Image (tube, helix red, strand yellow):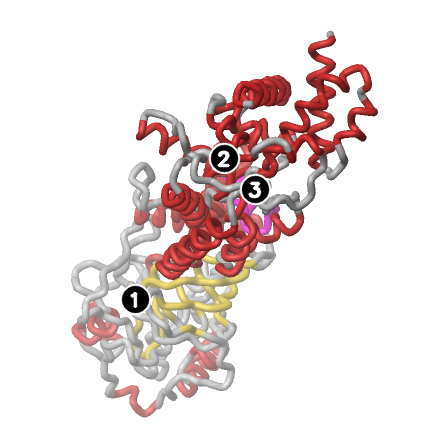
């Protein structure tokens, strides 16, 4: 006990000396140890006086100062970029770790079934982006494969959204399969545009922003060419190149993508199945985009030509004879490759021959309500006039109305 | 001259923070403030001014390296410097495989500024230095840190890598041993 106590007393006195107190002050606090502590503390104070002489310290301090300055000048103390990069990398590592935790949890699985407009939909897209950003790592799926998977998911979502009539904004990418004046068919989706459409090439890959309506319609907000800067924006004042009725007799095919054909797909048209409507593009089940070569055929209806749905028994030669044109001409305009293959129900363009009353079968197929093929005559009043060459359309409509 | 570094924690921490953020002037300020005690700590235990200078220089170069490699301390700079000085000393003696015997023989007594006890007048400071050299390395160290540098018990324990209770016993025995040697010399 005494040994421990005197150790404590000595330690306390050392602290008191360090604070500037005198030895006597401390000895008064520990009278029982005063005799033993006094000479020890005196010896300690002696050590305090053992010091380096200034004439020894100062030259050394100057020489070392010189070395230190040399070291300081050699390089900056802190590499700013390194510091920033480390923080940046650390931040991303933490972010990825959190996201991976979330992905591996049930939240992501639940979110995977979400649709645009659902609470978890943003999270779904976010987790997909994270998976994409991880794609360069060796253990992850290929980025192209992921992109294809996600693109198909987008289209599935749109199909569901349309099916349930949810009003929401959607985005997806797809392949242009047909183009009309106010509608465009992209990967099986009929998009109604409230603005003039640019001249898309059939088979062109596009990004689509659209909103779905309660009626299950898709209204295009923007259609953007992938890998291109041209964006299709609403341009209310712009009108397509005027179609001259006088050209009806001598239409010329315009196989390039710079033309402004007059064509239309009505979203509500049931008879005209979108994927079969106009083109030689693959069906919607095909996920491989159409390769567009420089000689890609563009369906381009010359002025005065009308849409016609192929009926059973039709042949190209009979249609050509009825419309006073040639088989080759019909094939060229409609990008038909094989004259011997015609699909019943398919729509093609034919010259509008309204002045021949004995040819009532050549009628616009652009219909409402899906009864376009019921004689095709009297119901041909719904399409907006702008969808049909002015003169010929009115004649046709009038004629159809009278014939009813 | 008595070199005393009184704890000035806010200023110490501020200097340290600025130095860590790349402020070279903060490093210079640290150097001016802490070179004397570090040099003294080393000089008391090596026999050559030049060796002490080199070792003290190493301490501050290591501070620079620590700042550049983001391993500099965030507080208790003084303790860190003494710890590094101690490592530098151990490395020095590790190379030489022996501790100095007559490190302090060339020293002269510091000017007698304020005597607190008549006892001190009668004792040759030179003798105290020689006596200090005869102590064990740990005993020298604890006396220099606790009496010479007036570090706290905790700081000393931290620098020496011991527990505070061990330091209490060590400093007691060290002073007793020093006193015994001084008595033999006398």
Helix, strand or loop status at disc 3: helix
Q: Disc 1 to disc 2, how far (Cα)?
A: 77 Å
Helix, strand or loop status at disc 1: loop
The answer to whether B139 appears left or right of B56 in the picture is: right
Per the image, the residue denoted by label 3 is B78
Is residue A344 or residue A72 the one in the foreground? A72
Helix, strand or loop status at disc 2: helix
The range drawn in magenta is: A111-123
Q: Is residue A121 magenta?
A: yes
The answer to whether A337 appears left or right of A182 in the picture is: left
Image spot of residue A398 (x, y percent): 48, 81
Name which residue lies at 80% across and 15% down. Answer: A32
Image spot of residue A379 (x, y percent): 49, 69
Q: What mark, if any, has residue B83 been given in the picture?
A: 2
- Do marks 3 and 1 both belong to one polypeptide chain? no
The quarter of the picture where residue A179 lies is: bottom left
Q: Nearer the viewer, mark 3 or mark 1?
A: 3
The quarter of the picture where residue A7 lies is: top right
In the rendered image of this protein, does residue A243 appear above or below residue B145?
A: below
Per the image, the residue denoted by label 1 is A202
Image spot of residue B72 (x, y percent): 49, 44
| Label 2 chain ID | B
């Amino acid at each position: 006990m005494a040994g421990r106590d005197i150790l404590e007393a000595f330690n306390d006195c050392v602290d008191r000396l360090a604070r500037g107190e005198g030895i006597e002050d401390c000895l008064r606090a520990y009278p029982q140890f005063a005799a033993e502590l006094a000479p020890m503390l005196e010896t300690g104070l002696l050590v305090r006086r053992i010091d380096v002489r200034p004439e020894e310290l100062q030259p050394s301090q100057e020489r070392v100062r010189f070395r230190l300055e040399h070291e300081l000048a050699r390089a900056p103390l802190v590499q700013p970029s390194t510091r920033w990069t480390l923080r940046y990398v650390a931040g991303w590592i933490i972010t990825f770790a959190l996201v991976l935790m979330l992905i591996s949890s049930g939240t992501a699985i639940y979110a995977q079934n979400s649709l645009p407009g659902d609470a978890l939909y943003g999270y779904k897209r976010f987790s997909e982006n994270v998976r994409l950003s991880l794609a360069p790592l060796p253990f992850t799926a290929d980025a192209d494969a992921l992109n294809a998977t996600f693109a198909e998911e987008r289209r599935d979502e749109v199909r569901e959204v349309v099916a349930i009539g949810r009003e929401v904004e959607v985005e997806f990418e797809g392949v242009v399969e047909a183009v009309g004046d106010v509608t465009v068919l992209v990967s099986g989706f009929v998009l109604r545009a409230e603005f003039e459409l640019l001249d898309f090439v059939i088979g062109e890959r596009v990004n689509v922003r659209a909103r779905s309506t309660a009626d299950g319609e898709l209204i295009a907000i923007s259609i953007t060419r992938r890998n291109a800067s041209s964006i299709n924006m609403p341009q209310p004042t712009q009108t397509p190149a005027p179609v001259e009725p006088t050209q009806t007799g001598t239409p010329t095919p315009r196989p390039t993508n710079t033309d402004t054909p007059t064509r239309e797909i009505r979203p509500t048209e049931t008879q005209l199945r979108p994927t079969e409507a106009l083109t030689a593009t693959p069906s919607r089940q095909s996920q491989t985009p159409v390769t567009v070569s420089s000689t890609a055929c563009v369906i381009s209806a010359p002025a005065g030509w009308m849409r016609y749905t192929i009926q059973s028994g039709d042949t190209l030669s009979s249609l050509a004879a009825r419309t006073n044109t040639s088989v080759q001409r019909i094939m060229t305009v409609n990008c038909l490759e094989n004259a011997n293959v015609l699909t019943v129900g398919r729509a093609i363009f034919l010259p509008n021959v309204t002045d021949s009353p004995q040819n009532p079968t050549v009628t616009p197929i652009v219909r409402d309500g899906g009864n376009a093929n019921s004689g095709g005559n009297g119901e041909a009043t719904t399409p907006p006039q702008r969808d049909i060459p002015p003169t010929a359309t009115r004649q046709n409509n009038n004629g159809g109305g009278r014939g009813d | 001259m008595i070199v005393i570094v009184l704890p000035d924690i806010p200023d110490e921490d501020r200097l340290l923070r600025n130095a860590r953020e790349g402020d070279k002037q903060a490093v210079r300020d640290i150097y001016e403030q802490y070179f004397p005690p570090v040099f003294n700590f080393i000089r008391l235990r090596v026999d050559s001014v030049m060796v002490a200078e080199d070792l003290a220089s190493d301490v501050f170069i290591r501070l620079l390296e620590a700042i550049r490699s983001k391993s500099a301390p965030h507080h208790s700079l003084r303790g860190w410097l003494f710890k590094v000085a101690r490592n530098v000393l151990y490395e020095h003696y590790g190379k030489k495989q022996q501790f100095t015997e007559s490190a302090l023989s060339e020293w002269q007594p510091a000017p007698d500024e304020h005597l607190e006890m008549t006892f001190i007048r009668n004792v040759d400071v030179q003798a105290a230095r020689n006596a200090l050299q005869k102590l064990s390395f740990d005993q020298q160290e604890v006396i220099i840190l606790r009496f010479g540098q007036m570090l706290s018990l905790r700081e000393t324990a931290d620098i020496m890598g011991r527990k505070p209770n061990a330091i209490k016993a060590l400093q007691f025995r060290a002073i007793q041993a020093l006193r015994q040697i001084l008595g033999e010399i006398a």
